[in-house]
């Protein structure tokens, strides 16, 4: 099975103190530490597990710049067979639809049985997977938390739905799935593995290579634009109740009555 995983490089919130820039229209990006979008890492691990059982290859692609090669090499060190960079000045400033348009061009130039994305981007929304499926006219499912290969033409999947319930479905290949975090445990990537792929060439494809009209992507074509950033107003904080369980329960009931929560 040929599987494509669409990945994204994002600021690592565990390693950075995120601050607004002077203009208040973006975060301060100088000296940020970046890493792969966490949900995408689960998607790569799931692709590797499927291929281990059914055979095939895993390709990881990202839309970005030369700096984004680092996440491709990390996922190749994790076990992906190929890493591909989709890069062109025309792609700069693309919204979700623009990124999906670029990915569509790459999918149509190749043959993939299955396309995986993370459930959402940590620095954006969760729209790219669904948009890509619509553009390709492929079946789509989101919040997928298990995948079973039925035969060469179908998958059996489960989705997380409201109330902690699971919805079981059968879906035809080729298809696009957005993978929920927690579907698996992504394997550890050591420095030895990273060094082994450090010198491998990462192919780069631009708009003309993908057959993408430059006017359909980029900032000028974006229908969704970020107008403002702001830091939420700091609240008064929490009230810590002390005492025994019975005393805490009595205090909580009294507070709820005082605030009109209980009659």
Image: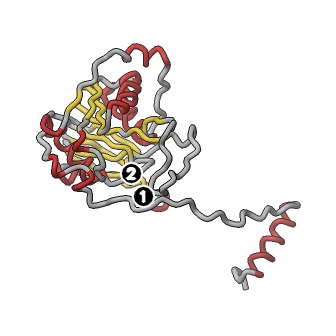
Quarter holding the N terminus? Answer: top left
Q: Position of residue 35 (x, y in %)?
A: 46, 35
* Nearest the eye: 120 or 223: 223
Q: Secondary structure at mark 2?
A: strand
Q: Quadrant of residue 203 in the image?
A: top left
Which residue is pictured at 52% across the width and 60% down the height?
A: 230
What colouring does the structure picture have?
A: secondary structure
Which residue is pictured at 43% across the width and 41% down the height?
A: 10
Cβ atoms at labels 1 and 2 below 8 Å apart:
yes
* Nearest the eye: 85 or 214: 214
Q: Which residue is mark 1?
A: 161
Q: Relative to 171, is 151 above or below?
A: above
Label 1 environment density (alpha carbons within 10 Å; few <14, some 14–19, many ≥20): few
* Nearest the eye: 69 or 133: 69
Q: Position of residue 168 (x, y in %)?
A: 35, 52
Count of numbered circles in the view: 2
Q: Quadrant of residue 236 in the image?
A: bottom right
Q: Earlier in the sequence, mark 1 or mark 2?
A: 2
Which numbered circle lies on residue 22?
none
Which residue is pictured at 39% across the width and 48% down the height?
A: 119
Q: Which residue is mark 2?
A: 143
Q: Secondary structure at mark 1?
A: loop
- State the separation of the CA atoms marked 1 and 2: 8 Å
Q: Nearer the viewer, mark 1 or mark 2?
A: 2
Label 2 environment density (alpha carbons within 10 Å; few <14, some 14–19, many ≥20): some
Which residue is pictured at 35% across the width and 38% down the height?
A: 7
Instruction: Single out the residue that lies furthest toward the front.
Output: 22
Quarter holding the C terminus? Answer: bottom right
Left or right: residue 112 compared with residue 129 = left
């Amino acid at each position: 099975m040929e599987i494509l995983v669409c990945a994204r490089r994002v600021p690592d919130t565990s390693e950075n103190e995120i601050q607004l820039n002077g203009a208040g229209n973006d975060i301060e990006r100088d000296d940020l530490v970046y890493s792969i979008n966490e949900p995408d890492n689960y998607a790569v691990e799931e692709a590797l597990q499927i291929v281990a059982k059914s055979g095939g290859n895993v390709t990881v692609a990202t839309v970005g710049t030369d700096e984004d090669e680092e996440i491709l090499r990390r996922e190749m060190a994790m076990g992906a067979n190929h890493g591909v960079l989709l890069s062109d000045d025309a792609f700069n400033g693309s919204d979700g639809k623009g990124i999906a348009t670029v990915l569509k061009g790459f999918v149509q130039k190749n043959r993939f049985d299955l396309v995986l994305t993370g459930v959402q981007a940590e620095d954006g929304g969760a729209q790219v997977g669904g948009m890509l499926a619509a553009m390709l006219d492929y079946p789509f499912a989101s919040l997928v938390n298990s995948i079973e290969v039925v035969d060469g033409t179908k998958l059996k999947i489960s989705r997380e739905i409201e109330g902690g319930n699971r919805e079981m479905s059968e879906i035809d290949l080729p298809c696009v799935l957005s993978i929920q975090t927690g579907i698996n445990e992504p394997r550890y990537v050591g420095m030895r593995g990273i060094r082994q792929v450090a010198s491998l060439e990462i192919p780069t494809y631009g708009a003309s290579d993908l057959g993408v009209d430059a006017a359909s992507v980029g900032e000028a074509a974006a229908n969704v634009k970020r107008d403002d950033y702001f830091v939420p107003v700091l609240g008064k904080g929490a009230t810590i109740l002390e005492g025994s369980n019975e005393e805490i329960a009595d205090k909580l009931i009294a507070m709820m009555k005082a605030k009109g929560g209980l009659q």
